[in-house]
Image (cartoon, coloured by chain):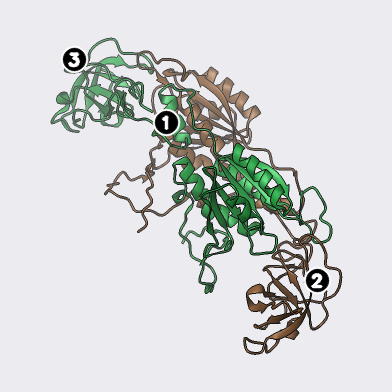
Chain colours: A green, B brown
């Protein structure tokens, strides 16, 4: 997005001080201050009427407009005002000292916000500076969440026997919200090819990407692979990744949309969500959120890793000053 | 918050495999497999009817309940099923192998979520596991934002002369939202003691903390200090901090609420917001968000810092694999 105007729109002072012609201050010092005629002050938000001729000065507060004629500002700390109608400057200024020039922050016509930027608070500040109080943004990526498994029940149901609650729909949904995507929950589907296919079919029509949790293990009731392949080429692209947890992860493409089959175990599903699904969303968003979430830290215990797979461990970060 | 039940609520298998009495497998190997009578399989979500007596085994999928009698699970990779009604196990298992015991993830009565926790997606997962679909949370901290200065105009106004748009209300509001606080905008107030005091008075009544931007410089129209002190002790606690930018920052307390006077310059105000205001919100929230937002990085240019003040520079982070 190109800036429609300069920010600031006028030359401003970056300090409280006296606007001067820098040449008037050359060679001055504590012993031989430059004597300048005091010609009033600049009010914040208004324009000084008049030109600062040689030998004259006006007071300018921080952020105030530097009047015509002046080319530098001397900080109030380096000037004396004994009240005799003159200001005595005891430190020389060079042209441009303490001046923020028109367009210094943002030049009209220059790019103010790059396309693909995820707007942060400081970007909102840039938009406010340009007077932009609304703008078109990209739609959030819609991600369908399907939870499969005969053992899964809604979280408000008391599990009977060896049933378990549908954790993944909720943790993935919260993870998508935290990422900045829009989750669409499709609920729980039993391990049945036709049922799963019907829901995936609907999700592919309504979403930009689809997550299927459960059903990606080598177990007997694995229908996810068949479903993904049933929509034609390319279907399943990856089945099994050398990571721990999450080895049985499936990555596929159907109707030009991404489908990821996540492990049923909630901790594994959530880790794969972070390691792979968030990267996938980055690609779809044309952004990179990876660096923002990486921190170098020391591990407090020895952890042997000899699985032959890249391991991802949940850790608790503690901050120590040393 | 204490867990109301065990998670999982039953002993589960962490792999696809065969539930066994570990003692049956002692000493077995590729050459001399343990021969176990195949006694059916465990369906996901249902309970196996029967006890796994010595010499018997059943198939259990990942996450399935381990039947009574069995005390370990042998991965499917280490067992052969030639179809003769027996399973041949070629790797010994120890009791507990591949078993996730009842309550291993969360023990009933133990703390599931600590008070003061800012709920992340994984915490939502823990709540889902416990069947908790709603809970009482602390109210967001309400923070009033007051923008002072005769030169400030609303962002939808085209600035005339040396007026400038009210950037701070919007960047601070967005920063508070990103932090997780609730911003309350009080708009623009001119540099007038009575006007500022009236708005601060109202904000102190409606908010948990108040930010006043502008008016904290040593300039002529500085009324913020007087206003903060007008509410009685302790009033202004800090005026001026040895940091750059943001030297003229004011920190005070009135009616037992925090008031922070921020510099008028948007970049300075926003930096002070991050460095001081977010820490203040951490204290009010009894949390620490500092570590989460710190990243160690190398600076690409030499930057001389000889101001005698601690400097905070906005930087652009770039991720390089090396």
Q: Which residue is mark 2?
A: B67
* Residue B241 in which image quadrant: top left
Residue A161 visible in image: yes
In the rendered image, residues at marks 2 and 3 fall on the same chain: no
Which subunit holds the residue at mark 3? A
The residue wearing badge 1 is B266
Distance in Å between CA atoms under marks 3 and 1: 32 Å
Chain letter, disc 1 residue: B
| In this picture, residue A62 sits left or right of residue B6 | left
The crowding category of the residue bearing disc 2, from other C-alpha atoms within 10 Å (few below 14, some 14 to 19, many at least 20), is many
Residue A81: percent from left, percent from top: 28, 23
B231 or B261: nearer the viewer: B261
**Residue B225 image point, x, y percent:** 49, 29
Which residue appears at 27% of the width and 23% of the height?
A18
* Mark 2 chain: B
Residue projecting furthest to the top? A49
**Nearer-the-camera pick, B152 or A303:** A303
Distance of label 2 from label 3 (alpha carbons): 96 Å
Q: Residue B239: percent from the left, percent from the top?
A: 46, 36
Say which quarter of the image contains residue B98.
Answer: bottom right
Splitting the image into 4 quarters, where does residue A114 fall?
top left
Q: Residues within 10 Å of mark 3 (few under 14, many from 20)?
A: some
Specify the farthest residue to the left.
A27
Q: Name the residue beneath numbered marker 3.
A: A53
In this rendering, the label closer to the viewer, 2 or 3: 2
Foreground of the two, B14 or B154: B14
Q: Residue at x 71, y 85 (%)?
A: B34
Q: Nearer the viewer, residue B204 or A227?
A: A227
* Left or right: where B123 falls relative to B148: right
Numbered tag placed on residue A131 in the rendering: none
Q: Secondary structure at mark 3?
A: loop
């Amino acid at each position: 997005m190109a800036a429609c105007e300069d920010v600031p729109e006028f030359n401003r002072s970056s300090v409280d001080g006296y606007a001067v012609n820098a040449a008037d201050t050359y060679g001055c010092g504590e012993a031989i201050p430059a004597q300048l005629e005091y010609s009033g002050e600049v009010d914040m938000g208004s324009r000084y009427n008049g030109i600062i001729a040689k030998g004259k000065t006006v007071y300018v507060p921080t952020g105030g407009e530097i009047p015509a004629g002046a080319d530098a500002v001397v900080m109030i700390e380096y000037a004396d005002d004994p009240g005799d109608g003159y200001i005595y400057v005891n430190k020389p200024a060079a042209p441009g000292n303490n001046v923020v020039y028109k367009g210094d922050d943002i030049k009209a016509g220059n790019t103010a916000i790059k396309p693909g930027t995820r707007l942060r608070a400081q970007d909102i500040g840039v938009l406010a500076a340009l007077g932009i109080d609304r703008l078109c943004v990209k739609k959030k990526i819609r991600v369908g969440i399907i939870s499969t498994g005969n053992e899964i029940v809604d979280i408000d149901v008391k599990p009977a026997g060896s049933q378990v609650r549908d954790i993944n729909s909720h943790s993935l949904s919260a993870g998508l919200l935290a990422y900045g995507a829009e989750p669409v929950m499709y609920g729980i589907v039993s391990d049945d090819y036709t049922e799963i296919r019907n829901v995936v079919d609907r999700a592919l029509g309504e979403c930009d990407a689809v997550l299927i949790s459960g059903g990606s293990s080598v177990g007997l009731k694995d229908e996810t692979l068949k479903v993904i392949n049933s929509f034609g080429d390319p279907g399943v692209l990856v089945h099994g990744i050398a990571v721990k947890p999450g080895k049985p992860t499936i990555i596929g493409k159907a109707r030009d949309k991404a489908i990821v089959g996540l492990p049923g175990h909630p901790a594994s599903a959530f880790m794969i969500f972070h390691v792979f699904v968030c990267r996938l969303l980055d690609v779809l968003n044309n952004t990179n959120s990876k660096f923002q979430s990486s921190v170098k830290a020391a591990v407090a215990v020895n952890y042997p890793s000899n699985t032959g797979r890249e391991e991802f461990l949940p850790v608790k970060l503690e901050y120590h000053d040393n």
